[in-house]
Image: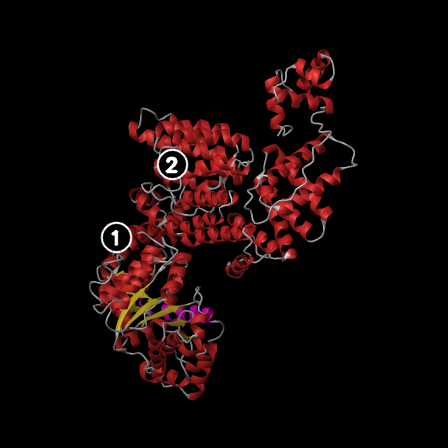
Amino acid sequence: MIVKTKLYIPHKRQDSVPRPRLMRKLDEGLEAKLTLISASAGYGKTTVLSEWARQSGIAVAWVSLDKQDDEWISFWTYVTSSIRGQAPGFAQTFMPLLAKGPSSSFASSEPAVAAMLNELNRLPGELAIVLDDYHCIELPEIQRSLSYFVDHLPPHIHLYIASRIELPIPTARLLAKGEMRRIMIQDLRFLPDEGDVFFREIAGLSLSREQLAELYHQTEGWISGLQLAAISLKRSDNITESIRQFSGHQTHISDYLMEEVYLLLPESTRAFMLQTSILSRMNHSLCDAVTGQSNAQEQLERLEKWNLFITPLDDQRNWYRYHHLMSDFLRRMFIRTDPGLWAQTHVHAARWLESHGFEEEAAEHYLEGRQHEDVVRVIENNLQAFLQKKFAVLSRWILQLPESVISRRPMVEMFYLLLLIGIRQWDKASEKIERAKLRYEALQGTMDDAEWKNVMGNLYYLCATSSYFKKDLTKVSDYFELVDQYAPEGSFLQTIGNNRYNGYDEFEDHLTFINDYHGASALLLKWIARWGDKITHPFAGRIQASYSKLLYEWNRLEEAERCIGQVLRPQDAPPNTRSMLQIYVSASRIQQALDHPARAAELLERLKVQIESPDYAVFLRKIEAEQACLAVRQGSLSAAEEWLERCGMTPTDEIPLNEAAEYTALARVLAACGRTDEALSLSERLQQLFWKEDRLRERIRMLILQSVTHYRSGQPNKAIDLLETALGLAWPQRFVRSFVDEGQVMAELLTAYQRAQQGRQPRNASYVLLNYANHLLQALNRLPTGSKAPIKAEVRVLEAVLVEGLTNREMEIVRLMAEGMSNKQIASHLGITEGTVKSHTNNVYGKLGVRTRVQAIKKARELLLLS
């Protein structure tokens, strides 16, 4: 719902000090794209902007922002509505785009904002757009789209922003090009002559030059400080002594003066101000509801007349708000002096707001008033809407509520349990999920059957998720069976955030988290068979992407290509940005491995264009990191170096786990560009992170990167030691591509590793890894002939590969068995008796732990003893 008072230019005060100097500075903003008015509270940013807006002579679209507008759709809807107030009919072409959220297009960066700019370009006259209190806006997606908006503003459209902090968008280029003006504290503070006018003509105080100088020195021209001082001095019996006591930081001054002013007010006025201080904006009806009085309009007008830091929000004086300093002071005093009434007042405000359609604000007040049942009721009644537009706010509310209240609302409880998983409280979540499962299973027959099945479908999904984080793949599959029984098209919880980045790669790239690739293969194949033809199922695309990555790692490229080709976003499939990222990245890597570099690059570009998400910037960052790695693989170091310059990451940054993939890309690109020390330092910290988090694949890949980097920098012994560690970790899972993707340098390293083993005392483990290295060299030699760097690898036939104690003769017999020879043929071929062959065969069975020839051949292939 649009709050219209937020679009009104604040009422002009009749007693304001004329400030022609500032008016001229604001007029200069009409020659620029952006004018920033930046200062802390109490410097008159809103006052001076509103006065300029009323006398500027051009159309002004005004938006008074607050923390409720820190949502992409809400923010741009208010901006659009304010412009429409000056240009009726505006926004007809792009409102549907606006309702979709942030960018869905890389080409234009912001389709909704681009469409808005096109309409602005068609407006006939000059327009100033004013965003007041912009410091309330923190969402990165809003900052990114505002940056795009400013960069492309038509010349007759001007943006004015008032904020307590510097803008979190790039402005250096605008300043350099003369397209930005800045009005700072030094511009806003009263000059001595303006202070003189204020005290003499507005406040009606006749102060000496020395008294004015002392006040000015104490407040440093801080307007609110001077206003507070004036109110206090009017009631002082000793002006000189009162001025002398004004000292300290602005906050201390404001607290002291507020108390001096507040304590001199009538008790009824103080009570009214305390109770209404909880409101971010107020009208007489809301104030009557909050205070239980019936004279709120009279009180509001009296406060305005007394200059007690209250501002009308419209010309009709229907809506008001307190100055931030006054509001902060009153709230602190209210909760300190009467916490019981504080809570009760919030409840009165919540009921009025809910009855007038302001559910989000109502929930905030119910929460402050500790009316938890009402908070949960509001959440449940608006759950879908809050999930779509207020996810962060909803999460904050849920985590503040008692579990006893949440447990009485099934779908709210399901979201709460999912939220515990999302914030990594896995043990706590697991315990609560198990208790909830038992509780709801016992309710069968006492609840509506459809509702009960819906709850159980979601609850079994939570059980599957909990098992997944315990790396228990068998239980994951068992619970998925139950989910499929009760929610065959996917549970409600499975669909939450499909278009958002949830911050946890465990949910996205399953092979980041699962260390058992053979177990993963069985799990993924089972559920691909079950969900593969359900294009609407929320997990269908993601598990197919994970299986294609597994096939890719095992170097089964043709199978991987067929697998991923089935889910390269069919036109009739619903958008699922999280799945699309995994699908297209996997497809790109497969195409590069198949020696189709142009296709690999084109897939990542197409992914940029197809993303539709409020978290577009996060997804784009991940795609561009993948593009940088692809550039390294394709030998385009200039593109990789260009990414280094603009990626915003440095090798000394703290590494968030959810950005580990981007920092891994950074380490790889640094190494490729010859920045060896930085690459090794970063990779060592990444290695420690992956060890701590038990991420096997990432540990192996980081060891490989470190090994290759040391080898290139002339440290072969260190490189070989690291490679051996990587081989030891990778062999049980049969990794191939993580090594092979390094190309010629890996061929040289593997050959150097084999040579380094010569002369060492033979050990079974060493022979296994030597044979594994041989297997990888064979894979390197089979790379496509069109590769930019043909592989020259020395593949040696190992004379003594002793696995589980197998002798050379026993290994030879295994190879002949695999060729299909009978015992009699083997005896003839080797020139030994058939009885000796049987004896060797029995030894092989015992050492390999098998009973038949077929099992022996299969086990030998699993151990990479046979090509």
Residue 95 vs 255, above or below: the answer is above
Query: In the rendered image, which quarter is residue 321 located in?
Result: bottom left
Residue 451 vs 186, above or below: the answer is above
Q: Are the residues at dot 2 and dot 1 in contact (C-beta closer than 8 Å)?
A: no
- N-terminal-most mark, 2 or 1: 1
Give the image location of residue 380, x and y in percent.
Answer: 31, 42
Foreground pick, 448 / 517? 517
Q: Is 486 included in the stretch rendered in magenta?
A: no
What whole-number distance in Å separates the C-alpha atoms at marks 2 and 1?
27 Å
Residue at the image point whose x is 69% and y is 46% from the top:
719
Give the image location of residue 141, x and y in percent.
Answer: 40, 56
Foreground pick, 128 / 722? 722
| Residue 329 seen in the current view | no
Q: Which residues are magenta?
A: 250-266
Query: In the rendered image, which quarter is residue 196 located in?
Result: bottom left
Identify the image quadrant of the C terminus.
top right
The residue at which mark 2 appears reads as 407
Mark 2 Cα shell of 10 Å, populated few (<14), some (14-19), many (≥20) = some
Q: Could you tell me what secondary structure mostly forms the magenta stretch? A: helix
Give the residue type that dot 2 points to.
Ser
- Name the front one of labels 2 and 1: 2
Q: Which mark is residue 131?
A: none
Give the image location of residue 57, x and y in percent.
Answer: 25, 78
Q: Which mark is residue 352?
A: 1
Give the image location of residue 346, x and y in percent.
Answer: 33, 53
Foreground pick, 359 / 328? 359
